[in-house]
């Protein structure tokens, strides 16, 4: 087989070729220059970001006799043998298929022998998280007391599955998703070297579809070249990725905002007839609506993500769009996307989705710049309802005036039992927004400003290290209280709070991230931001009441005839005493509030 895939031909052979990981490459080069080589490294990060390539380059650099500025020469016998995979002293192992105890014991036994040709014997264990518990235990002793001239490089896409004892014995490097701009520049360089004609728009589509993985980008590019007979066109890139053109997305979203259900359904049918992937279409929609929200707040972020492609139609749509409606649309898209995984009829879900999101704005207005005719119709309906209510009030007043005084009831009776259930039903009963105070109050009992500052200082780094889905949820959060064993996190929007409290994977990812950054995993408790102020005030009142009741128990009871009692059975003197106790307890409450939230946000008000 003479042809090789692009990602194999253009695999990085030196640190300068690695795309999107400048901090890691610079650190590894300095390690070689200063001869501070560790015995074990952990390369963690998403797929296709250069973990295995970096491991092979590092293996060449530590063994190359002609290394210069930390870079291998790639010309000597050692470098070429490592590149071809024929050097016996550099062993690459796939842990997915060699995950037993016996395989690791074999590595441990052979690692004791000195290298035959190279300076260091290097073991590259890929997908190390697939090892069994017994295999990890067998590897642990070797990592703890490694033989001389042996280096272990562990690569994984799921570092949270590794035992903490393994991670603590390695130097960890976290590979980040590669930015679309870097992927685009690398593809342009490769195509120019191969003298292949390409469309800039096609490369932008591929760069976005790769989701931060260079290997995925080159695989899609390879497929697009094959589909277009070594010519990369915009249409071919759309066909290969299953994406929808920007113009068609704008047309569909505009129809949804204008509540033109019939036209939106026609657009869906057109998309399905063109052979587009339904799941990819929903993914494109989520990304499009996300860009609309971002453009309203930070246009430069959208310009960077979309690689500069933002037309006037998109700008106008972002200006007119109602943010509250978009939040609901994104939530609906996410729910439909989950349901479509198990269906053989995605077109049905797309049509139901279209009808649903096109009618979301009925009670809120389609957009901030909605059509004036729609607003006039709503205003007319409201005026009609007001007139009907006024006429009913006048009729009721006249009927009461015409009733003889003797027949009127002497006092007002309570509402009939029939009306009570209706009033009860009018109350909100959304259980998903209820907060578990039994988890929050213990955290507040031991919360300090020092613990909160520590969590807040690590929060931005934690969010940036999460994957795309989890990062989108946690971007609108902030820690509001913390103790040495727990943290309370508030969400700006209820819909994201409801999604987060049931997302076990998200909670585990946040816990693992905090453990890596601050050294321990606190108990996480989520609250909606709009409820946090009330929860905090209720807690302070609860603490003050508790202290007041303890003080009352230590005070001798007063005589029952010391003064006239109020309707509640309290004498004026006892009420004054209670007020004095509450006032004396206030400094303790203020002290507790200061410990929890700091001086700058404490507001003391008299009852």
Image (cartoon, rainbow, N blue to C red):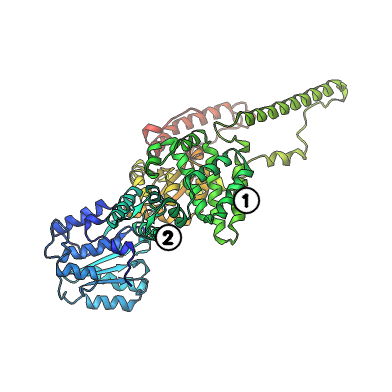
Q: Is residue 488 visible?
A: yes
Return the residue at label 1: 352
x and y percent of residue 62 in the render? 17, 64
Along the polypeptide, which appears first: circle 1 or circle 2?
A: 2
Q: Is residue 333 left or right of residue 218?
A: right
Furthest toward the left, the residue is: 66
Return the residue at label 2: 227
Element on which disc 2 rests: helix
- Alpha-carbon neighbours of circle 2 within 10 Å: few (<14), some, or many (≥20)? some
The mark closer to the camera, 1 or 2, is 2
Question: Could you tell me which residue is drawn at 30 percent across and 72 percent down?
Answer: 93
Q: Is residue 467 visible?
A: no
Question: Could you tell me which residue is drawn at 20 percent across and 73 percent down?
Answer: 89
x and y percent of residue 429 in the render? 62, 44
Q: Nearer the viewer, residue 168 or 468?
A: 468
Q: Nearer the viewer, residue 281 or 521?
A: 281
Rendered image quadrant of residue 342: bottom right
Q: Is residue 292 above or below residue 92?
A: above
């Amino acid at each position: 087989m003479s042809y090789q895939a692009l990602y194999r031909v253009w695999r990085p052979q030196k640190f300068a070729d690695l795309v999107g990981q400048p901090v890691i490459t610079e650190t590894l080069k300095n390690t070689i220059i200063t001869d501070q080589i560790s015995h074990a490294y952990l390369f963690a990060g998403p797929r296709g970001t250069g973990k295995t390539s970096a491991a092979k380059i590092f293996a060449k650099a530590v063994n190359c006799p002609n290394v210069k500025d930390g870079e291998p020469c790639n010309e000597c016998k050692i470098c070429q043998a490592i590149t071809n995979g024929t050097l016996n002293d550099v062993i690459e192992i796939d842990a997915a298929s060699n995950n037993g105890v016996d395989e690791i014991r074999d590595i441990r036994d052979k690692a004791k022998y000195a290298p035959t040709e190279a300076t260091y014997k290097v073991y590259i264990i890929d997908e190390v998280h697939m090892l069994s518990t017994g295999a990890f235990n067998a590897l642990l002793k070797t990592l703890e007391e490694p033989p001389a001239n042996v280096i272990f490089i562990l690569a994984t896409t799921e570092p949270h599955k590794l035992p903490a004892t393994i991670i603590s014995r390695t130097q960890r490097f976290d590979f980040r998703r590669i930015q679309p701009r870097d992927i685009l520049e690398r593809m342009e360089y490769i195509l120019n070297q191969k003298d292949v004609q390409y469309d800039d728009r096609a490369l932008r589509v591929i760069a976005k579809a790769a989701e931060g993985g260079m290997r995925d980008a080159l695989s899609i590019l390879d497929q697009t070249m094959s589909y277009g007979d070594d010519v990369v066109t915009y249409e071919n890139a759309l066909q290969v990725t299953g994406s929808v053109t920007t113009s068609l997305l704008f047309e569909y979203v505009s129809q949804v905002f204008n509540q033109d259900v019939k036209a939106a359904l026609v657009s869906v049918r057109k998309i399905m007839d063109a052979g587009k992937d339904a799941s990819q279409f929903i993914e494109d929609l989520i990304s499009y609506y996300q860009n609309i929200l971002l453009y309203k707040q930070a246009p430069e972020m959208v310009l960077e993500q979309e690689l500069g492609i933002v037309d006037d139609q998109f700008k106008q749509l972002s200006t007119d769009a109602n943010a509250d409606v978009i939040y609901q649309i994104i939530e609906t898209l996410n729910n439909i996307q989950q349901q479509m995984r198990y269906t053989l009829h995605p077109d049905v879900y797309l049509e139901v989705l279209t009808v649903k999101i096109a009618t979301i704005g009925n009670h809120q207005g389609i957009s901030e710049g909605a059509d004036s005719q729609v607003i006039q119709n709503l205003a007319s309906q409201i005026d009609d309802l007001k007139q009907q209510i006024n006429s009913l009030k006048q009729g009721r007043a006249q009927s009461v005036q015409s009733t003889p005084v003797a027949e009127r009831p002497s006092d007002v009776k309570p509402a009939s039992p029939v009306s009570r259930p209706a009033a009860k039903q009018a109350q909100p009963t959304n259980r998903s927004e209820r907060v578990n105070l039994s988890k929050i109050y213990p955290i507040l009992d031991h919360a300090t400003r020092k613990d909160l500052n520590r969590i807040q200082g690590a929060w931005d780094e934690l969010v940036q290290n999460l994957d795309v889905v989890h990062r989108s949820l946690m971007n609108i959060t902030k820690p509001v209280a913390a103790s040495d064993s727990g943290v309370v996190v508030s969400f700006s929007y209820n819909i994201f709070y409801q999604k987060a409290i049931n997302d076990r994977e998200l909670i585990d990812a946040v816990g693992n991230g905090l453990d890596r950054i601050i050294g321990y995993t606190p108990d996480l408790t989520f609250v909606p931001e709009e409820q946090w102020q009330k929860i905090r005030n209720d807690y302070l009142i609860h603490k003050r009441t508790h202290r007041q009741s303890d003080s009352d128990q230590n005070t001798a009871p007063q005589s029952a005839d010391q003064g006239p009692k109020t309707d509640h059975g309290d004498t004026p003197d006892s009420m004054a005493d209670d007020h004095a106790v509450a006032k004396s307890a206030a400094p303790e409450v203020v002290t507790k509030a200061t410990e929890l939230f700091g001086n700058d946000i404490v507001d003391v008000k008299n009852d």
